[in-house]
């Protein structure tokens, strides 16, 4: 201890450092004083930076600590999602939401993108304000999904899917915020379409590989049958994929384990069968950092004459028919785990925003279409995760995640792992095909004036434009 002025909240810090001595660390302090931090959080202040600064000052006062910020970033990062949830609970217990309430907290599913700007908050608040209370999604408990998402969005210091009114059921924050089981069941199931079943003959063919584990037996089986690529394309695709994938194994070290391969290498050698699955359909696959036209259209919706075009989100693979977009793929070089920064950003923010932009675009082009879905393949090294988006209510889009599957790196698991991947991609193909079918015109249309000038409330609220990172020169936004 020293002669300086005692730190803010002396009555909390003094006993903590006295009782913990050398065991004290920032994560432990936040965990033990979560309720206190939430209660004493001031609307508008940066939650993480404020309490890190307070902790640092207190530690230096009592212990002479140094390099606290570095150790926190590397080893002691608290679970700010728990604090955010507590703050939200306090807000939900109040009678109303303040329009100026903007707190700063990074949860497990926020990105490491730029801090949120005033224009971002303006878009977010304007979208919420435009919603009719009678059209909000009311759950059995009486909670309205849009209200909960808005209040939670106000607690986030970096962008979250909630700011786009996208609820991703794989994000653990929603299980915390919707504590009633009936509410969660409705969020999961209402107006949901199940994954299509795999054709029996297709599945039986894939299962015929299971009792074979050597390279020669597997390859001989793959080459033992012929399927006409015109009349029996899905079977031809499965057989060709099995044979092509097997030919990656005779060259040890070239493909497995993954080393310095680029995202392009991985897509070209391991995941080319995803692209080829759609060859017999009107669906066109374009790869190589393709611009998502739907998000570009949204970003430029309020562009004035003379202003430069803002680019849309770039995806590694784009699924489209003519000018309509139905899905995408995002790829990473390696699987860093479910909560790795890149996978978290791609799966919980970038891809969902792109999918919602596609839904908005499809809804505008095909106002009478029903049961529209968009989907994305999230590829991280040898792992593939499929996410699907639909629209269960007027203002909310829902993301469902399929169980992740892995490209086999050993012949011991080749039959089961490869067969499971082919089944999943075949199911995804069926999902896209039924959405394409839903957008087909069934009658001749007459010319009509564009009435968007008088349409003030969008049919499906668009995503707010993501703030750009500092020092990034190109005018590119998600």
Image (tube, grey):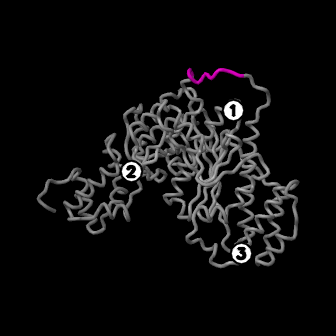
Name the residue carrying label 1: 366
Report the side of 136 relative to 221 (left or right).
Answer: left
Indicate whether 27 appears above or below 254: above
Residue 313's spot in the image, x, y percent?
Answer: 54, 46
- Magenta-drawn stretch contains 13: no
Indicate whether 183 appears above or below 271: above
Q: Quadrant of residue 437?
A: top right
Name the residue carrying label 2: 471
Residue 476's spot in the image, x, y percent?
Answer: 49, 45
Q: Are marks 3 and 2 in contact (CB under 8 Å)?
A: no
Spatial separation of the CA atoms under disc 3 and disc 1: 46 Å
Residue 421's spot in the image, x, y percent?
Answer: 71, 61
Name the residue carrying label 3: 411
* Range drawn in magenta: 447-454
Element type at mark 1: loop
Q: Are marks 1 and 2 in contact (CB under 8 Å)?
A: no
Residue 187's spot in the image, x, y percent?
Answer: 60, 42
Badge 3 or badge 1: first in the primary sequence:
1
Badge 3 or badge 2: first in the primary sequence:
3
Q: Nearer the viewer, residue 136 or 251?
A: 251
Element type at mark 3: helix
Report the side of 372 relative to 216 (left or right).
Answer: left
């Amino acid at each position: 201890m020293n002669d300086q002025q005692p730190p803010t909240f002396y009555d909390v810090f003094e006993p903590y450092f006295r009782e913990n001595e050398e065991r004290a660390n920032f994560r432990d302090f936040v965990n033990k004083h979560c309720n206190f931090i939430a209660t004493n959080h001031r609307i508008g202040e940066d939650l993480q930076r404020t309490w890190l600064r307070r902790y640092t000052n207190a530690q230096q006062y009592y212990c002479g600590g140094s390099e606290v910020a570095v150790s926190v970033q590397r080893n002691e990062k608290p679970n700010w999602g728990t604090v955010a949830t507590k703050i939200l609970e306090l807000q939900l217990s109040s009678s109303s939401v303040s329009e100026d309430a903007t707190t700063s907290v990074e949860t497990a599913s926020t990105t490491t993108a730029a801090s949120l700007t005033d224009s971002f908050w303006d878009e977010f608040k304007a979208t919420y304000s435009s919603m009719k209370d009678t059209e909000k999604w009311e759950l059995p408990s009486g909670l309205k999904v849009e209200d909960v998402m808005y209040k939670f969005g106000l607690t986030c210091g970096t962008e979250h899917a909630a700011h786009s009114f996208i609820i991703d059921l794989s994000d653990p924050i929603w299980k915390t915020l919707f504590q009633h089981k009936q509410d969660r069941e409705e969020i999961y199931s209402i107006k949901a379409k199940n994954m299509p079943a795999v054709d029996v003959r297709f599945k039986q063919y894939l299962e015929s590989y299971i009792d074979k584990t050597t390279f020669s037996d597997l390859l001989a089986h793959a080459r033992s049958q012929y399927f006409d690529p015109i009349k029996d394309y899905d079977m031809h695709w499965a057989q060709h994929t099995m044979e092509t994938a097997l030919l990656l194994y005779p060259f040890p070290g070239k493909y497995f384990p993954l080393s310095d391969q680029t995202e392009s290498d991985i897509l070209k050698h391991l995941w080319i069968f995803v692209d080829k699955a759609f060859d017999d359909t009107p669906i066109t696959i374009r790869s190589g950092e393709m611009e998502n036209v739907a998000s570009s259209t949204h970003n430029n919706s309020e562009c004035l004459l003379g202003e430069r075009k803002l680019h849309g989100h770039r995806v590694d693979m784009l699924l489209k028919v003519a000018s309509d977009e139905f899905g995408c793929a995002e790829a990473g070089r390696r699987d860093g785990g479910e909560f790795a920064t890149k996978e978290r950003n791609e799966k919980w923010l970038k891809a969902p925003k792109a999918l919602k932009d596609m839904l908005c675009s499809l809804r505008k082009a095909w106002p009478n279409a029903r049961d529209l879905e968009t989907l994305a393949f999230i590829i991280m090294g040898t792992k593939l995760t499929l996410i699907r988006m639909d629209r269960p209510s007027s203002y909310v889009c829902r993301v469902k995640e399929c169980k992740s599957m892995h490209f086999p790196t050993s012949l011991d698991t080749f039959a089961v792992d490869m067969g499971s991947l082919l089944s999943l991609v075949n199911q995804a193909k069926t999902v896209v095909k039924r959405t394409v079918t839903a957008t087909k015109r069934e009658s001749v249309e007459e010319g009509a004036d564009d009435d968007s000038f008088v349409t003030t409330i969008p049919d499906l609220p668009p995503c707010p434009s993501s703030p750009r990172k500092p020092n990034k020169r190109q005018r590119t936004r998600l």
